[in-house]
Image: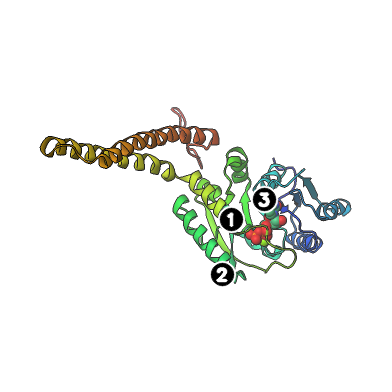
Amino acid sequence: MNKGAYVSIVVPVFNEEDGLRELYSELSSVLKGIGKSYEIIFVDDGSKDKSLEILEGFKNTGQNVKIISFCRNFGQHAAVMAGFNSSEGEVVVTLDADLQNPPGEIPKLLEKIEEGFDVVAGRRMGRKEGILRKFSSAVMNIIISKLTGVKLKDYGCMLRAYKRSIINYLLQYGEKCVYIPAFASWLTGSVIEVPVKDNPRKYGKSKYNLLSFLRQAFDLITAYTLVPIQLISIVGAVFLIISVLLTGYLLSFRFFFGTPSPLTTFVAILLFLSGVTTFFIGVVSEYLVRMSIETRKRPLYIIKEKFERKNGDK
Ligand code: UDP
Ligand code: MG
């Protein structure tokens, strides 16, 4: 895979015209300072401003740049995956285009990779964000750490470094998994966080709002658990149990006291019918879930190393 570049920098870009030149020159000077070969991959995610034009301008700067442009906006995840796909480095670093992740922190991440970690994640210190944003990030962090079992302090920071092996796994299996950090953490136990600076957004504004946060949370929950589906069967079963109890009550009422109230009978029938329907919807959904897990093609396990001594070996 590695055709020269030691580190590939992947930058998703969506309407970031104001900061791109600054980012590019900062990145270049930091990377030159490291003294190893590098490539910078900009993925334009269907920007509607001058971003692509500016990126095209980088083509002739004699540096190792790759520019990929989407025909429309496919989202940050897709852009990062496209960047991974054409990356050649032994190490791949992702970074936002909005200068919130300072390029100056990249050497710190690379140091940790060299120490042997598979994934090095930036942890944003001193974040300057609104209270609502902070709150939703905190909720997301709790959800992710519960679901993936990997305890990071900051899952939302895109300033990360991955070893080639992890990138290959992500490319192979992670396409359907919308949340790269969670999947990467699931893949390997060898994850470490390093504190990085976090700048406020200098130009433009954030592409995300509360709604996209909710969508992401829902994506995650459905990607990692069966709880929402199992809830359907449980509700159905509860309905059924109540209807059975109610029927028992109605029968004994009839036996000892005469005709029971029609309303109670109606409720019993209603509960029974809706219980049956809900329960079987739950069962069908379980099958659907199994199928979707299958199509996600996640590996059953990942071997880190294998040792084998055959008969006759010394
Ligand atoms: N981005 C993208 N496609 C999108 C939305 C965002 O490529 O549909 C890029 C954006 O240009 C930036 C990064 O993803 O480089 C993070 O976006 P943003 O800064 O808006 O997110 P925030 O920092 O507010 O979480
Ligand atoms: Mg940002």
Quarter holding ligand 1: bottom right
* Residue at the far left in the pictured view: 256
> Around disc 1, counting alpha carbons within 10 Å, would you say few (fewer than 14), some (14 to 19), or many (20 or more)?
few
Q: Secondary structure at mark 3?
A: helix
Callout 2 amino acid: Ile
Q: Position of residue 179 (x, y in %)?
A: 57, 49
Q: Nearer the viewer, residue 227 or 89?
A: 227
User: What residue is pinned by disc 1?
Assistant: 211
State the CA–CA distance, disc 3 to disc 2.
Answer: 23 Å
Callout 1 amino acid: Leu
The reply to whether the residue tagged 3 has its Cβ within 8 angstroms of ligand 1 is yes
Q: Which mark sits nearer the N-terminus, 3 or 1?
A: 3
State the CA–CA distance, disc 1 to disc 2.
Answer: 16 Å
Q: Secondary structure at mark 1?
A: helix
Q: Nearer the viewer, residue 57 or 249?
A: 249
> Which residue corresponds to the image point at 77% horizontal and 62% vertical from the top-left?
23
State the CA–CA distance, disc 3 to disc 1.
Answer: 15 Å
Task: Please give the label number shown on residue 131.
Answer: 2
User: What residue is pinned by disc 3?
Assistant: 76
Instruction: Kindly report which numbered mark, 1 or 2, lies closer to the viewer in this rendering.
Output: 1
270 on left or right of 297: left
State the quadrant of the N terminus. Answer: top right
Callout 3 amino acid: Gln
> Which residue corresponds to the image point at 49% horizontal and 54% vertical from the top-left?
144
Is there any visible trace of residue 115 in the rendered image?
Answer: no
